[in-house]
Image (spheres, rainbow, N blue to C red):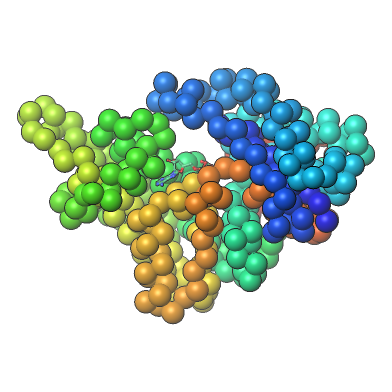
Amino acid sequence: MYILGIESSCDETAASVSLDGVNILSSVVSTQIEEHKKYGGVVPEIASRRHCENILDVVDEAIRKSGLTLEDMDAVAVTHAPGLIGALLVGVNFAKGLCLASGKPLVPVHHLTGHIASNYIAHHDLKPPYLCLVASGGHSHIVEVLDYTKFRIIGRTRDDAAGECFDKCARALGFPYPGGVYIDKASADGNPDTYPLPHPKVAGSEYDFSFSGLKTAVINKVHNAQQKGENICCNDMAASVQKTISEILVVKTIAAAKAYGYKKIALAGGVSANSGVRNALSKACAENGFEVFMPPRELCGDNGAMIACQGYFNFINGIRADSSLNAAATLSIEKPL
Ligand code: KG4
Ligand code: ZN
């Protein structure tokens, strides 16, 4: 079964064709990062305009590279939520137009379920149920993947997402947007024990996260040092931030897996590219006898392949949309439609 997947929820216009979800025949990603870098973050209106300009070429290229035609597709899957509303609307309306013109079924995909599905592409042996740590620029969740289209959140962030925390700490250290990857690189040459940083306690739920205290602590340390004319060692601070975020994410995920009886743990979302998080989760899983799954780095960020993959599972489970499909800036993964 051939699925065309379309993604435009943030600053990547992406499309992909998959065979039975997990075999990727083509994947095209057009990123706008260089343009948003100038402003220190994604400018929503610019993102929407670039999606408008790029989407036709990106989709066309994805179909062409797959060696197939639109006629060969069994369905068109599109990210409809969550994300920047103006950005999502471009992909949703483009997909609706394609379906209207071609008569193909339209399949809505929740962006975070797409991130989770990137694991099926890399690990054909992974099957639900399992526990997934989803950490991106906008979300940090511990999710029970009960089935391919059924999810339950057991932990969430109360404030900033892990990716947001990486990016804001990176900004305080003078790195460009999005700073997560710069923290990752600088960490390789830093001592993670140089700057002790807080591990926030979250009242009420053992599995919820809070990253705003950590972010504030880093910003304060950097600014105080600047005011006193002292030097902060950038690599050491980056390594300390990465170690702390990794510990917070992994400790809670392992605790949740034990409490809920999961022995398979997956990682997903943009932050899953982070070496510290990957290493800490792999180590903790090995120590506890858990199986661990993570996407290859090229599938960690936003891409069309993960949408084509989850689109396939949605499609074979009867999930469809009609021409009334709308985009939504926020939508729970527990009710992904
Ligand atoms: O999933 P994603 O591409 O977009 C959203 O759906 O939000 O995630 C983007 C986030 C950004 O905060 C980015 O800095 C972070 O993922 N990120 C990283 C790394 N690569 C991307 N954070 C830490 N280390 C990385 N190597
Ligand atoms: Zn994403």
Indicate the position of residue 264 as horizontal and vertical percent values.
53, 72
- The residue lying toward the viewer, choosing from 105 and 304, is 304
Q: Is residue 49 above or below residue 219?
A: above
Residue ranking furthest to the bottom: 289
Indicate the position of residue 33 as horizontal and vertical percent values.
49, 30
**Residue ID at (57%, 42%):** 302
**Residue ID at (61%, 23%):** 50
- In terms of image quadrants, where is residue 321? top right
Q: Is residue 194 above or below residue 123?
A: above
User: Is there any visible trace of residue 172 in the rendered image?
Assistant: yes
- The residue lying toward the viewer, choosing from 294 and 160, is 294
Indicate the position of residue 71 as horizontal and vertical percent values.
90, 42
- In terms of image quadrants, where is residue 313? bottom right
Indicate the position of residue 177 as horizontal and vertical percent values.
40, 31
Q: How many marks?
A: 0
Q: Quadrant of the N terminus?
A: bottom right
**Residue ID at (42%, 72%):** 285
- The residue lying toward the viewer, choosing from 141 and 204, is 141
**Residue ID at (11%, 27%):** 227
User: Is there any visible trace of residue 4 in the rendered image?
Assistant: no
